[in-house]
Image: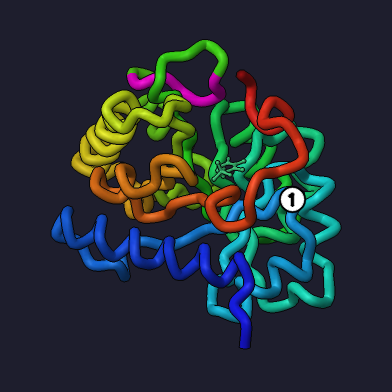
Amino acid sequence: MLKTPITKALEEMQKNIIAACHKAHRSPDEVQVLLASKTVDPQNLKVALDLGYNLLGENKVQELKQKADHPLLSTAKWHFIGHLQTNKIKDVIPFVKMIHSVDRMSLAKALNTKLEKLDMNMDVLVQVNTSNEDSKFGLSENEVLPFLESIATLPHLKVKGLMTLALFSDKPELVRPCFKKLKTIFEKAKAEAIPNIEMQDLSMGMSNDYTVAIEEGATIIRLGTAIFGQRPTPDSIYWKQ
Ligand SMILES: *Cc1c(COP(=O)(O)O)cnc(C)c1O
């Protein structure tokens, strides 16, 4: 059978993951691939699902709702990776196993309240701004530990780690410090051993920089264009630029 471009891209990615893990003396089992599925149609996502890549992430609530119910995608597991508005919480909770982008206490509290009503818990990551750009969402380095202490008191949120959108650059030497910073905060938080807070996941690394992220400890990499090609939409609608 002729290989599709998506199949080839996934094979290439798998080789790169193995090489990066080898370089960093890590096991490839420690790295989960999350496919950022925005703008990709279900037929193409199905190719990845059939190859065993079943963790998908959406950045926008509307698109998540459409895809999560799609019959071709019934084997997918979904994470929400975009900026989440408090009034959209109810549309996200039913579909996802994890929310990567908890970046403020008002959102955490609203999530907890809704989850309590539904008698559910939710895995979440705390989003950190590691590039010091005003334009990025996420807590600054110094805010993370106090935030974790507060969020720990919300019983329906299960913090599993940290997430970042690094500096956007094709120069690894500029991106690497962002990943190192997230890893350092992660280790500090882990050492605090805050009750109800688990530090197991580092969601960092995208198409341009995932091998660097793996070298610096990523456990979840989020890939879109490297697998599915360029998107028709500008990035500015998914994150502030
Ligand atoms: C789209 C998206 C990605 C993947 O971006 P690529 O550059 O296409 O790999 C990663 N993280 C988030 C939050 C995204 O929205």
Please give the name of the residue rendered at 60% of the width and 44% of the height, measured from the top-left corner: 81
What residue span does the magenta drawing correspond to? 136-141
Colouring scheme, one of rainbow, by chain, secondary structure, one colour: rainbow
Residue reaching furthest front? 2
Looking at the image, residue 132 lies above or below residue 31 = above
- Is residue 217 on the magenta stretch? no
- Ligand 1 contact, mark 1 (Cβ < 8 Å): no
Drawn side of residue 113 relative to residue 199, left or right: right
| Residue 45 seen anywhere in this rendered image of the structure | yes
Q: Residue at position x 63%, y 44% from top? A: 112
* Amino acid found under the numbered disc labelled 1: Val
Residue 114 image point, x, y percent: 73, 46
Secondary structure of the residue carrying numbered label 1: helix
Q: Is residue 138 magenta?
A: yes
SS assignment for the magenta stretch, majority: loop
Q: State the image coordinates of residue 209 (x, y, percent, origin top left).
A: 39, 41
Percent of width and height locating residue 234: 72, 31
